[in-house]
Image (tube, rainbow, N blue to C red):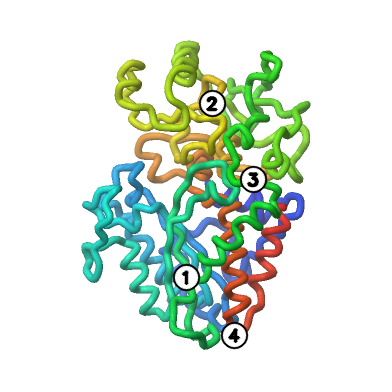
């Protein structure tokens, strides 16, 4: 499902000013590939890439077994997939590696979320420490830091572990020190100019992000709804109609750039019963907004679910997850649409999503519907900020520098 979304946006029908993705179809069939499969069947072709050389390998191994928002199961087999990422890096030998994950990857299992203890030098340490050590053994300077996406124009309180590795043999000789750390220094020093280049302030609120997608009009009336005609949605759903609306903030204008003016993708509304809408309205009205509902409030509303956030209109949204009922809209008695999720992640409105909208039960480990695709993603604006910092450090310290600058220039054009 996630590959279908990628293909729709970057292979089959690029929109606006987005560059077509250069898929290596002379040796790699255009389809979804599992990491084990591509390593087993195409190790020779991957190994040949190191002769070019490749500027960057970027990836994000599954985070479910590391996340404090989930069960944090130390035996989750997905925890080991970062080792396949390392196998990929070992074959390709890129100049730079980039990895994103939840902060829990840097905390050893068995250590509390707020604990400062870090186990080093043995297998009981965190997965991040294992990753760092193995990348260093492959010849990389490695640095990881927790980065808050809301500081880079993303309207969401989303802290993530960003790990950067730079291959020492391709860097100019320099004074002793970890040159991967320079990427984070550049990221911070350029933060103000990055926001300024996008026309954004210090933070972007939920209202700034999705205030043009509400059910309620500013005059107290309601915007019209239309039937959802998405072929991957069962009949009987409705969606928000964007026709006739205008962006109300700089951020909304940024997201609307190059988007269709008539119908927007993934605007389907959940089918809440009257009772559910009534309960949501009471929660949004009477419970503290912007924080997770406390035990007393959950008990008063007879809610079993532990993670429910009534949004605050004036602050960045809570962390978007793969569960659409984690967050309640700040002024409509409902959960958010996929498009609103995407806005909070900083996906532009021209970006379309494919596959079913939701899934449940055991299928959650096998399927990747639209809400999951958005919730698991790296926010594009955060990616752009990190990319600019990485590009500048490579330009200053790499022995030769070719293609990475062109790739990031295309990314900047697409976003701005």
Residue 351 position, x and y percent, is 65, 45
Residue 269 position, x and y percent, is 57, 25
Q: Are marks 3 and 2 in contact (CB under 8 Å)?
A: no
As measured in the structure, the alpha-carbon distance from the residue carrying label 1 to the one carrying label 4 is: 18 Å
Q: Are marks 1 and 4 in contact (CB under 8 Å)?
A: no
Which residue, given by chain and number where applicable, does mark 3 sit on?
201
Which residue, given by chain and number where applicable, does mark 4 sit on?
399
Q: Earlier in the sequence, mark 3 or mark 2?
A: 3
Nearer to us: label 3 or label 2: 3
Q: Earlier in the sequence, mark 1 or mark 3?
A: 1
Residue 181: numbered disc:
1
Q: Is residue 275 above or below residue 134?
A: above
Give the residue displayed 61% in from the left and 61% down from the top: 190
Q: Earlier in the sequence, mark 2 or mark 1?
A: 1
As measured in the structure, the alpha-carbon distance from the residue carrying label 2 to the one carrying label 1 is: 39 Å
Q: Is residue 225 above or below residue 404?
A: above
């Amino acid at each position: 499902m996630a590959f279908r979304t990628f293909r729709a946006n970057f292979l089959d029908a690029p929109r606006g000013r987005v560059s077509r993705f250069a898929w290596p179809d002379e040796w790699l069939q255009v389809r979804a590939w599992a990491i084990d499969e591509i390593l087993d069947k195409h190790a020779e072709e991957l190994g040949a890439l190191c002769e070019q050389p490749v500027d960057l390998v970027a990836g994000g191994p599954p985070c479910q077994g590391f996340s404090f928002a989930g069960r944090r199961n130390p035996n989750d087999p997905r925890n080991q997939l970062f080792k396949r990422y390392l196998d990929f890096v070992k074959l390709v030998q890129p100049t730079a590696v980039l990895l994103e994950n939840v902060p829990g990857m840097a905390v050893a299992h068995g250590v509390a979320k707020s604990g400062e203890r870090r186990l080093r030098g043995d297998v009981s340490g965190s997965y991040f420490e294992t990753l760092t050590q193995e990348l260093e053994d492959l010849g990389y300077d490695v640095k990881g830091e927790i980065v808050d996406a809301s500081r880079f124009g993303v309207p969401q309180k989303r802290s993530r572990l960003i790990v950067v590795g730079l291959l020492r043999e391709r860097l100019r000789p320099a004074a002793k020190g970890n040159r991967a750390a320079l990427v984070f220094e550049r990221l911070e020093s350029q933060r103000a100019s990055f926001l300024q280049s996008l026309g954004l302030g210090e933070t972007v609120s939920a209202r700034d992000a999705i205030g043009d997608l509400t059910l309620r009009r500013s005059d107290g009336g309601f915007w019209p709804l239309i039937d959802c005609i998405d072929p991957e949605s069962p009949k009987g759903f409705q969606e928000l109609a964007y026709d006739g609306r205008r962006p109300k903030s700089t951020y909304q204008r940024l997201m609307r750039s190059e988007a269709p003016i008539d119908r927007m993708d993934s605007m389907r509304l959940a089918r809440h019963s009257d009772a559910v809408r009534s309960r949501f309205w009471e929660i949004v009205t009477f419970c503290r907004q912007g924080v997770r509902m406390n035990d007393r409030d959950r008990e008063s509303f007879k809610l079993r679910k532990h993670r429910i956030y009534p949004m605050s209109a004036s602050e960045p949204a809570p962390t978007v997850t793969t569960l659409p009922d984690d967050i309640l809209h700040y002024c409509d008695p409902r959960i958010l649409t996929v498009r609103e999720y995407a806005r909070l992640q900083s996906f532009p409105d021209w970006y379309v999503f494919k596959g079913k909208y939701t899934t449940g039960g055991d299928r959650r480990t096998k399927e990747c519907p639209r809400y999951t695709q958005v919730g698991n993603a790296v926010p594009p604006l955060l990616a752009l900020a990190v990319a600019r910092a990485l590009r500048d450090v490579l330009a200053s310290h790499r022995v030769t520098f070719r293609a990475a600058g062109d790739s990031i220039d295309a990314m900047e054009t697409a976003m701005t």
